[in-house]
Image: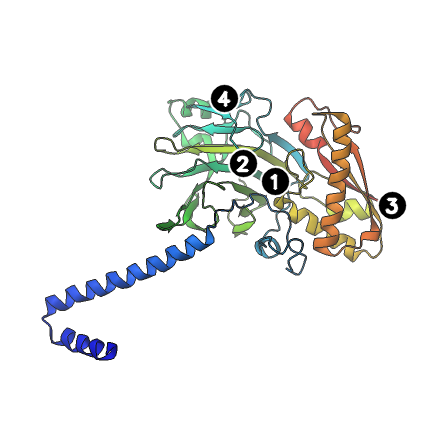
Amino acid sequence: MKTVIYILSIVFFLLAPSNLSAQLLKKMKDKVESKIEKKLDGNLEKKDDGQPENDEPSVAQNENGTETGNPKTKANTSYTSKFDFIPGEKLIISDDFSEDAVGDFPALWFTNGSGEVVTIDGLDGKWLMIKGRSQAFIDRLLELPDNFTVQFDLLCSVPFSWSSDVFNLYMEDVIDLARYREGNNGGEMSSRNINYHFWLDLHPGLLNPGSYTTKGYGHYRLNKVSAKLELNEIWMPSAEKSLLKVSIWRQGQRLRLYLNENKILDLPKLLPEDMNPNLFVFEPYSLGDGDHYFIGNLRIAVGNPDTRNKLLNEGKLVTNGILFNVNSDRIKPESYGVLKEIAGILKESGNIKVMIVGHTDSDGDENKNMELSEKRAKSVKDALVTDFGVKAENLETSGKGETEPLVPNSDNLGKAQNRRVEFTLLK
């Protein structure tokens, strides 16, 4: 019976007047689109099971991509395929706003508008909330070599309106900081005060289970070179998750951009040879009522780590690139690149034995810091063994707590330098 009705429908369609045919085509198209939307919505509803996603999953795969640990852990294949980011050797900027009072604008920063340090329910630490159309930057010019890395965390309020604008990051080669400040305070902004201007903007996607999904997007621009960035579902804020980890790696003319553990850009010849970035400017553009962007955990490091030489020839490797959750021995996923490189050296070098030593800053109780440093060293060993196949018998662990600082724990930078992991060859 259905077949007969279908055939009669086709005959009627072919014999109908053209305007009626067009109407029928539109109805059929709308019906198909409706079914597709319902199918997509159903998939979204199944995906969003009400369980909060883990913002900072531990490394969940071994070197060949096989899942390890809890079988329910969601493996991130981008770890092995794309996330080769390794932070610079020497940390020169580290600001988590812990030294600033909530409600104040951070003391070491400049703005031409307004912003304030805030805390966010469910997240550790403090964050800088920058108001729309306000620029914010650390108020000094940096002297950076050809090799450097920039890392920061980016959040948006949830829910976030699709009509609100992008979050901008400007990587500037500025001649005169005083003139730059003056221009951003309503004075004349002279292009002759900026040698080069790299512009990156990012916008979160919109996830409405049972309704529709709009993917995130972004752009990059340097002089006449520009392109759109498809963020797909990398940054899809929901009530449980809106964190985006931004990592930038400059090596000469080469620029790599990572969002979370996904490599978004890898352009070997993007930056001019004579470009010397010395200022990083953060600017949310036009925002709707109740919408906000937040930044945190800014880290800028310089130098290209010579991991192999330091470990095998000098006998000691010190890294700030293995990061942990606050007051925890849980390794953050952005540590993967460093762990992978160290594991490769250990496996290629035969049966060398290494002592892994954890260190903390001086915040908190001394005994607890000692215990935490020991646990962190053990976590590093476990990751190298479980996720990368390093022989457990070749690794020993120890913790020094806050007892052996490299520099005074007098500010954020000093504390960040003292929170480290050391690898020492055993005779």
Name the residue that disc number 1 marks: 148
Identify the residue at image location x=72%, y=36%.
Answer: 420
Name the residue that disc number 2 marks: 277
Q: Residue 10 is drawn in which quadrant?
A: bottom left
**Amino acid, disc 4:** Phe
C-alpha distance separating marks 2 and 4: 24 Å
The tag earlier along the polypeptide, 2 or 1, is 1
**Amino acid, disc 3:** Leu
Q: Tell which tag, 1 or 3, sits nearer the viewer.
A: 3
Name the residue that disc number 4 marks: 105
Judging from the image, what secondary structure is the residue with disc 3 in?
A: loop
Q: Is residue 337 left or right of residue 372?
A: left
Q: Are marks 2 and 1 in contact (CB under 8 Å)?
A: yes
Judging from the image, what secondary structure is the residue with disc 2 in?
A: loop
Image quarter in which the N terminus is found: bottom left
The tag earlier along the polypeptide, 4 or 1, is 4
Label ID, residue 426:
3
Q: Position of residue 82 (x, y in %)?
A: 58, 54
C-alpha distance separating marks 3 and 2: 41 Å
**Amino acid, disc 2:** Pro
